[in-house]
Structures are given as C-alpha cells and as structure tokens.
Amino acid sequence: MTDYLRETHHEFLAASREALADARLQQILGQLGDTLGRRNREAWAALPNSDLIRERARSIKDATLADLDKHLAKLEETVTARGGHVHWADDGLEACRVIVDLIRRREATKVVKSKSMTTEEIHLNHALEAAGIEAVETDLGEYIIQLARHRPSHIVAPAIHLSAQQIAEILSKPAGKRLPAERETLAQFARQALRQKFAQAEVGISGANFAIAETGSIVLVTNEGNGRLTCALPKCHIAIMGIEKVIPRLADLPYFLKVLARAATGQKLSIYTQIITGPRRPGELDGPEEFHLVILDNGRSRILGSPLRESLFCIRCGACLNACPIYRSVGGHAYGGVYAGPIGAVLTPLYDGLSANHHLPHASSLCGACQAACPVKIQIPEMLIRLREQLHHEPEQRSRLESLAYRFWAWMLKRPRLYQISTWLASRTFGRLKRGDPWVRRLPGKLHGWTQRRDFPAPAAERFRDWWNKEGRDE
Amino acid sequence: MSDSTAFLARIRQAAEQGRQYRVHLQPFDDQIGYLGAGDDLVERFAAEVNAVGGQAFVVPDLEAARKQLSDLLTQAPAASAVCWQHSLLDRLGLGELLPAAGVELIDHQRLANMPEVEHRNKLLACNVGITSCDCAIAETGTLMMCSRLGHERVASLLPPTHIAIVEQPQIVPDLLDAIAKLAHRGVESLPSNVTFITGPSKTGDIELQLTTGVHGPGKWLVIVIAGANNGG
C-alpha cells in the first residue's frame, strides 16, 4: 500500500488547538450547520420515504460488495466493448504511473482536472508535476487551493477554510491585477482563465462518482460544469475510481442520485449528472477520442474483508462533516488526511495506519449525527468504537497499566458483593464530598490522562440501589 | 499495470470474507423511491425549472414558442448560436428564425465542414446554445440530453446562455422514468454521453454562497410548449 500521505504524521490535538484559536475559520465553520447542514436536514424532511430510499441505496452497496469481483470483471468487459480501456492499480503509486504513462504516450503536457478525491488520495498532482506535466484543477474551490498549495478541507467544498478576501488575494496573482473580494467577479475571472486552459488541454482527468457494470459507464456529478468540459473538449479522458464505486445496473443509479445531491448540498439533483460510456462515436464532434478507466485498490480490498467493510459504502457527499460537532469546531485540516470529518476519522486510520492516526477514532463524541445525515446510513459511531478497541491491540498503543486497570474492573464487575461494596464506598466518600458538583475535573496521578480533555462524572451521593430500596419500590 | 486476474482474485477473496459482515438482505417494494410529479406535468416542470434558478416560459403552441425564442435572442443579445439538429427545432423553423433575428446559426452540418481550429473558435465565441432534449423530468426540473450526431454536448455547455425548447410529450414525471427510457433503448448501447441538466451552472465554493455561471451557462432558459404536437 502507498504511504499515501506524509513523512511526518499529523498531530490532531495541536492542529485542533490552532483551528480553535483561528477566529476567521471559526466564523466560517459556524455557518456550516446553518447552510449545508440545514439544507441536508430539510432535504430528508421533504423527501417522502427518505429513510427507505436511503436503506435501498445502502442495500445495493451491500449486495454489490458481496460479489465485487464479478461486477468489476463485468465492468472491464463492458468498458472494453464500448471502446474504452481499463487499467488496474494495486496502489496509488501504480495508479500515478499508469496515468503519467498514458499522458506521455500522447506526448501531452497540458492536463485539466475535474475535482476528484481519489486523485487527492494518491497525490496525482505531485506525480504529474514531477513528470513535467501541467495539471490544472478546474473546480473553482480546487483551483483556488491548488494556487494556494493547500489541501482540501471539505469533501465537497474544498476551499471552505478561505474567506472571499483571502480568495481574492490568491486569484489576484494569476490575474496580474488586484481583484475585489466580490464573488461574481472572482467566479467570472476563474471562468475566463480556465476556459483558456480547457481550450488548450490535451487530456482531461476526472474521478467517478459511480461506475455501472452492465453498461460500461462512469457517472460524474458536478454543479459547475467543469466536469462536463473536462470530458467534452480534450482528446483523451482518463477517469480514476476506487473499486467500491461500481454498481451493477443502470436501474440502481437513480436511488443514489436521489440521495447524493440531497445529502451533499440539499439539491434534488446536482446541476450536471453525466453518464459517460466510452469515447465519442464516429461522426460526433465533441467528447474524447480515447477513454481510459483506472481502477484503484490502495488498501480497499483489505477493508472489504474486514468488519469495517461498511466504510466502502461511502459516496463522498460530505454530509457527515456538516453534521459533526467536532468537524464544525476544528475544520478539515486538523484531521490530517485527505478525508476529513467522521468518515475521515474512519478512512484515514484504515488507509494510513491506525497507530499513526490514533487520535482520529477518538475525535468524536459518538453523538450519531453523522449516521443520521448519511445518505447510505453508514454506522460511523460503531466503526469508531471498533477502531478504538483495535487501538488497544496495537503494540505502540498498548499500556500495561491500562490493561491491568481494565482487567481489575472486569474482575470486580463479575462479583456482585464486591461491586456493591465498592459503589457504597464511592458514594460515601467521593459522592458526599462532591455533592452539588456532578463532575470531577481532575483525576489523580496517571488517571489525569483521562480528564485532560473531558470531565469525569462524580459518583452520586446516594446510589440508585439505595434510593430504589427506600422510595422507588412503592411507586 | 497490475494483472487483472491477480487483482480480481484478491477482490474475490476479500468479498467472500466480507460477506459475514453483510448488513442488509431485505427486498424492497418497486415503488420505493418513485416520487412522481402530480397531474399537471407542464406546470410542475416549469415550477421546478424556476426553483433551481432557471427561467421557464410556458407557451401554448409552436407559433408562440417562435415569438418567445425571438424575444429571448434579442434580449440576450445573440450574434451566433450553436444549435442542435432536432425535429422539434425543425418544426420551429430555426433555419429561418435565426437569420431573421440576425443570429448566425451554427449546427453540426456547418461544424463538420470546418477545420478543427476554426470550429473550436466558432464554438467558443457563441453567445447562445439552442437545444431540445431527449426527455424532461417534471419532479426535479431536469433535461436529459443524449449525445449523438447533431446533438453536440457543447451546445448546452459552452455559451453563457442555454435555451432549451421542450414540448409536453417529452416530459416524464420522475428520474426513474427517464432512466427506464434509457434502459429501454438497451443497456448495451448507451450514447457516449447522457447528461442530466438541472439548472444554470452554480458554485458554492466561495463562502458557501451560491454564484452562477462559473463554467457552464449562467442563464438557463426553457421554453415549454404546453399543447401536444399541434402542428403550428
């Protein structure tokens, strides 16, 4: 597997503290719940049977994964039959190599890209740059962060961490003049500048929201239209997808489309949904003459056979980010990986290593807002708990003292008399002492590790058992 | 490139191992997910087009559609228009209407005879794209566009204004109906590109505020002919 990421691993806590102290970022994040988050909740409320439609989408993913190899084999057959080419890539490095080779074979040097999280995951832009290929991101948000050399901070709104003022400064550089911080002007500038890039580009690179096995198609969902330009103007279109993106039938697609846009932006459908099937046909005047599909594993097959396989249901809508109180406090960059928010807290440890990202499974209050917002109802809190449990088995994370403490705890819980005595003692001592204040803010000694970032509930002055014996029984 | 046999063998093994963690096996009623659009498809379609930021013009017949189109071309204002070759546009008489409005008509036939560079420049200079659609979806205010000779993808993409002309029999209630239509033509032979368009080009990338016309057309105008096939 590729070391998708970085030489030095990211410190979630330090990055969070920085994010919390950044007033501008806090203001922007504060709007998320009232904009995208609210639109998502309203969209579920306005969609009759939304629960069952989401179940349906979920069950299609589940059934597809159970026979994933067959659907992928079928996809290869149909893409080839429609005149396209399929390439298999075990990891990110290999995917980058395949794509660079395809571009070199055409002797091309100018590439336009439509937004794709998968290309972020494999660091394609670095590989292209190293090969002397100019690759321009054309989604407005991606274009901005590419110029600023930032990482995306949100799955669907990659430049959400920047203000209009900051964006104006970033775009002023290629414009060669000072641009005002007006949205319309900035968008118009980007339109003009990127049109030039589209007109010159020899190759277009995109991701794929879905691939349909029976038809040999990929599906691209966008709002700006750059996704359409990317596969209408250049002579060659290269799409890259993770293995989990395939769905068996064309008839499966509408259920995903119905939930995807609602979850991502609160729209009934995104502005442009394309079903792309092979290169242009003889006589057609636009569309690519060559179509390539790169199918990427990069650790996914390992997850497919594990209890965390459900994370492969994700359709990258970003709804869990908007719903999450942690994401809305610390923003996307704090998570360190390419995927942020609750789903990022699951995916990054899975792809990049659990021990190296040991804070992420804990970066959640397990409130369940992510699961409620998810268009395919992924049980994110349950997966986070499972990852927390796995952390205890990681050699670097294992603590003798902690294991001993838990073993003692388990031993005592199995002995009712002992348990009763201990709760009686706790209520008589700490309980009476802490009367009126239900929280312990600092536990003594090593135990303080637990109270550094949370409060510990103090034992009650009177145990429930005692109250029940006295009063509860008669009610 | 990895060998497909080894790659798929690994996936097969993982998929089989993963089956013990399957989450859902219950069957679903066919109707789950079908929303429909009520009785009056024209009215609903027009309302949804307006709701997503387009402008719908409901007209009773072809004659009124001609008048509406002329008005829109004057307002644009348009010097040249890239147009589909489509039977509805033929009945509308685009070939006479555009020159009469002083608009240069650029269609497949003209483009196919141009050298590539000129062809590209012509397209990039067009102010307006005029199309019909393969079907329209009332529930969402969507146009389904299939690419083929004479149905260029760029007509609804490159110009700053896209005008689509739709007549009542083209409107279906739900996305599921549109997909069924596609499937009916044969899943083995989908067109090279099918695009569902639901509104003018939009972005929320600057401070989450909607801004239109960033890459595709910022103006999305749909003329809906309410009467069915009434000659004209």
Image: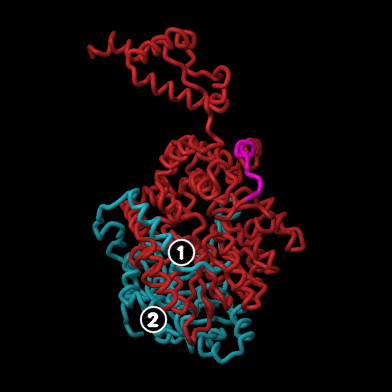
Chain colours: A red, B cyan
In this rendering, the answer to whether B97 lies above or below A348 is below
Find out whether residue B92 is within the magenta segment. Answer: no
To which quarter of the image does residue A99 belong?
bottom right
> Residue A2, how many percent across, how many down?
57, 55
Q: Tell me: A303 left or right of A226.
A: left
Q: Residue type at mark 1: give it.
A: Phe
Say which residue label 1 marks. Answer: B7
The numbered disc on residue B62 is: 2
- The C terminus of chain A, quarter of image: top left
Residue at 49%, 84% in the rendered image: A284
Question: Secondary structure beneath disc 2?
Answer: helix
- Magenta residue span: A6-16
Q: CA distance from mark 1 to mark 2?
A: 57 Å
Q: Earlier in the sequence, mark 1 or mark 2?
A: 1
Residue at 64%, 50% in the rendered image: A6
Chain of the residue under the numbered disc 2 shown in the image: B
